[in-house]
Amino acid sequence: MPTDSVSKPKIRVVPFSTDECPKAPTSGPPLFTWRDFYAFRNSVLRTLQNYGTVGPMGEMPILRSWEASQAARRADTRRPDFFVVDDMWNSWSRWNRVEAASHLVNTQLLWDLVRMLEGFPGWCVYLALGRGGLTVFAHRILWEGALFDGAQSIEELGSRCGATTME
Protein backbone atom coordinates (compact mmCIF):
# COMPACT_ATOMS: atom_id res chain seq x y z
CA MET A 1 0.00 0.00 0.00
CA PRO A 2 1.38 3.46 -0.82
CA THR A 3 2.45 5.45 2.20
CA ASP A 4 3.18 9.06 3.01
CA SER A 5 5.51 10.30 5.75
CA VAL A 6 6.22 8.17 8.82
CA SER A 7 4.94 4.95 7.20
CA LYS A 8 1.31 5.98 7.29
CA PRO A 9 -0.96 4.57 4.58
CA LYS A 10 -2.17 6.99 1.93
CA ILE A 11 -5.76 7.82 2.81
CA ARG A 12 -8.12 9.15 0.15
CA VAL A 13 -10.22 12.05 1.43
CA VAL A 14 -13.24 12.73 -0.77
CA PRO A 15 -16.81 14.05 -0.53
CA PHE A 16 -19.44 11.53 0.56
CA SER A 17 -21.18 9.82 -2.35
CA THR A 18 -23.10 6.61 -2.94
CA ASP A 19 -20.31 5.51 -5.29
CA GLU A 20 -17.84 5.73 -2.41
CA CYS A 21 -20.25 4.34 0.18
CA PRO A 22 -22.87 2.15 -1.47
CA LYS A 23 -25.93 1.14 0.53
CA ALA A 24 -25.70 -2.16 2.35
CA PRO A 25 -28.18 -4.90 1.50
CA THR A 26 -31.24 -5.10 3.72
CA SER A 27 -32.05 -8.75 3.28
CA GLY A 28 -30.39 -12.06 2.55
CA PRO A 29 -27.96 -14.06 4.63
CA PRO A 30 -26.47 -12.10 7.55
CA LEU A 31 -23.03 -10.63 6.87
CA PHE A 32 -22.01 -10.66 10.54
CA THR A 33 -23.20 -11.68 14.00
CA TRP A 34 -23.89 -9.74 17.20
CA ARG A 35 -20.45 -10.91 18.38
CA ASP A 36 -18.82 -9.33 15.30
CA PHE A 37 -20.69 -6.04 15.80
CA TYR A 38 -19.87 -5.72 19.49
CA ALA A 39 -16.24 -6.73 18.96
CA PHE A 40 -16.10 -3.86 16.44
CA ARG A 41 -17.91 -1.44 18.77
CA ASN A 42 -15.63 -2.42 21.67
CA SER A 43 -12.64 -1.57 19.48
CA VAL A 44 -14.18 1.80 18.60
CA LEU A 45 -14.67 2.52 22.32
CA ARG A 46 -11.07 1.57 23.14
CA THR A 47 -9.76 3.82 20.35
CA LEU A 48 -11.85 6.84 21.29
CA GLN A 49 -11.27 6.63 25.05
CA ASN A 50 -7.80 8.04 24.44
CA TYR A 51 -9.48 11.32 23.41
CA GLY A 52 -12.32 11.71 25.91
CA THR A 53 -15.07 9.84 27.68
CA VAL A 54 -17.04 7.22 25.74
CA GLY A 55 -20.44 5.66 26.21
CA PRO A 56 -23.06 5.85 27.42
CA MET A 57 -22.90 2.06 27.41
CA GLY A 58 -19.49 0.54 27.96
CA GLU A 59 -17.94 -2.46 26.29
CA MET A 60 -20.07 -5.52 25.66
CA PRO A 61 -18.50 -8.66 27.11
CA ILE A 62 -18.45 -11.30 24.37
CA LEU A 63 -19.61 -14.38 26.28
CA ARG A 64 -21.19 -17.69 25.25
CA SER A 65 -24.65 -16.24 24.72
CA TRP A 66 -26.32 -12.91 24.02
CA GLU A 67 -28.20 -13.17 27.29
CA ALA A 68 -25.04 -13.78 29.35
CA SER A 69 -23.26 -10.92 27.58
CA GLN A 70 -26.15 -8.51 28.24
CA ALA A 71 -26.36 -9.53 31.89
CA ALA A 72 -22.62 -8.90 32.41
CA ARG A 73 -22.67 -5.49 30.73
CA ARG A 74 -22.49 -2.22 32.62
CA ALA A 75 -23.25 1.39 31.74
CA ASP A 76 -20.12 3.49 31.43
CA THR A 77 -20.48 7.26 31.17
CA ARG A 78 -23.73 9.16 31.51
CA ARG A 79 -22.77 12.18 29.36
CA PRO A 80 -19.83 11.02 27.25
CA ASP A 81 -17.67 13.18 25.00
CA PHE A 82 -18.09 10.49 22.35
CA PHE A 83 -21.61 9.03 22.23
CA VAL A 84 -21.03 5.65 20.60
CA VAL A 85 -24.38 4.29 19.46
CA ASP A 86 -25.00 0.90 20.99
CA ASP A 87 -27.67 -0.57 18.75
CA MET A 88 -26.81 -3.05 16.05
CA TRP A 89 -28.83 -1.63 13.13
CA ASN A 90 -29.10 -4.93 11.24
CA SER A 91 -26.95 -7.86 10.09
CA TRP A 92 -25.76 -6.17 6.90
CA SER A 93 -24.64 -2.61 7.72
CA ARG A 94 -21.04 -2.73 8.96
CA TRP A 95 -20.77 0.62 10.72
CA ASN A 96 -21.09 2.40 14.02
CA ARG A 97 -22.29 5.96 14.55
CA VAL A 98 -20.41 8.22 16.95
CA GLU A 99 -21.78 11.63 17.95
CA ALA A 100 -19.31 14.23 19.22
CA ALA A 101 -18.40 17.89 19.17
CA SER A 102 -16.03 18.53 16.26
CA HIS A 103 -13.39 20.21 18.47
CA LEU A 104 -12.77 16.80 20.12
CA VAL A 105 -11.61 15.29 16.83
CA ASN A 106 -8.04 15.78 15.65
CA THR A 107 -5.67 14.31 13.09
CA GLN A 108 -4.24 11.70 15.48
CA LEU A 109 -7.72 10.45 16.42
CA LEU A 110 -8.50 10.02 12.70
CA TRP A 111 -5.24 8.11 12.16
CA ASP A 112 -6.02 5.90 15.17
CA LEU A 113 -9.47 5.10 13.76
CA VAL A 114 -7.94 4.29 10.35
CA ARG A 115 -5.44 1.91 11.98
CA MET A 116 -8.18 0.28 14.04
CA LEU A 117 -10.33 -0.17 10.93
CA GLU A 118 -7.52 -2.02 9.14
CA GLY A 119 -8.47 -4.95 11.39
CA PHE A 120 -12.12 -4.77 10.31
CA PRO A 121 -12.26 -4.97 6.48
CA GLY A 122 -15.45 -3.46 5.05
CA TRP A 123 -16.43 -1.72 8.32
CA CYS A 124 -16.57 2.03 8.96
CA VAL A 125 -17.19 4.60 11.67
CA TYR A 126 -19.48 7.55 11.04
CA LEU A 127 -18.52 10.63 13.06
CA ALA A 128 -21.57 12.92 13.38
CA LEU A 129 -19.96 16.25 14.26
CA GLY A 130 -22.77 18.79 14.13
CA ARG A 131 -21.61 20.96 11.22
CA GLY A 132 -20.33 18.02 9.23
CA GLY A 133 -19.76 14.32 9.21
CA LEU A 134 -16.91 11.93 8.45
CA THR A 135 -17.30 8.33 7.33
CA VAL A 136 -13.97 6.71 8.17
CA PHE A 137 -12.83 3.51 6.45
CA ALA A 138 -9.40 1.87 6.59
CA HIS A 139 -8.31 3.44 3.26
CA ARG A 140 -10.55 6.46 2.77
CA ILE A 141 -12.50 9.13 4.61
CA LEU A 142 -15.68 10.57 3.16
CA TRP A 143 -16.67 14.04 4.31
CA GLU A 144 -19.94 15.95 4.27
CA GLY A 145 -20.95 19.40 5.44
CA ALA A 146 -19.62 22.94 5.19
CA LEU A 147 -16.96 22.33 7.85
CA PHE A 148 -15.07 20.00 5.50
CA ASP A 149 -15.92 21.53 2.12
CA GLY A 150 -13.00 20.92 -0.25
CA ALA A 151 -10.83 19.02 2.26
CA GLN A 152 -8.25 16.76 0.61
CA SER A 153 -6.18 15.24 3.41
CA ILE A 154 -6.59 13.66 6.81
CA GLU A 155 -4.46 16.45 8.27
CA GLU A 156 -6.79 19.06 6.81
CA LEU A 157 -9.82 17.28 8.31
CA GLY A 158 -8.18 17.19 11.75
CA SER A 159 -7.13 20.82 11.50
CA ARG A 160 -10.63 21.97 10.61
CA CYS A 161 -12.11 20.05 13.54
CA GLY A 162 -9.50 21.47 15.92
CA ALA A 163 -10.20 25.01 14.73
CA THR A 164 -13.82 24.83 15.87
CA THR A 165 -14.88 26.10 19.25
CA MET A 166 -16.71 24.10 21.88
CA GLU A 167 -20.25 23.52 20.63
Image: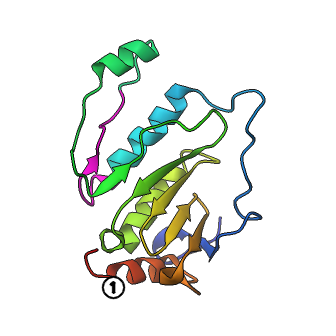
The amino acid pointed to by label 1 is Ala
Instruction: Say above or below: 24 vs 31.
Output: below
Instruction: Say above or below: 106 vs 92.
Output: below
According to the image, what is the colour scheme of the structure?
rainbow
- In depth, the one of 1 and 33 nearer the eye is 33
Instruction: Say above or below: 30 vs 124.
Output: above
Q: Is residue 115 magenta?
A: no
Q: Residue at x 48, y 52 (%)?
A: 97
Local crowd size for mark 1, using a 10 Å CA cut-off: few (<14), some (14–19), many (≥20): few
- Find numbered disc 1 in the image and state the secondary structure of the residue it sits on: loop
The N terminus is located in which quarter?
bottom right
Q: Position of residue 25 (x, y in %)?
A: 75, 41
Q: Position of residue 146 (x, y in %)?
A: 52, 83
The C terminus is located in which quarter?
bottom left
Q: Position of residue 140 (x, y in %)?
A: 61, 66
Instruction: Say above or below: 142 vs 151.
Output: above
Q: Which residues are magenta?
A: 48-60
Look at mark 1 in the image and give the residue it sits on.
163
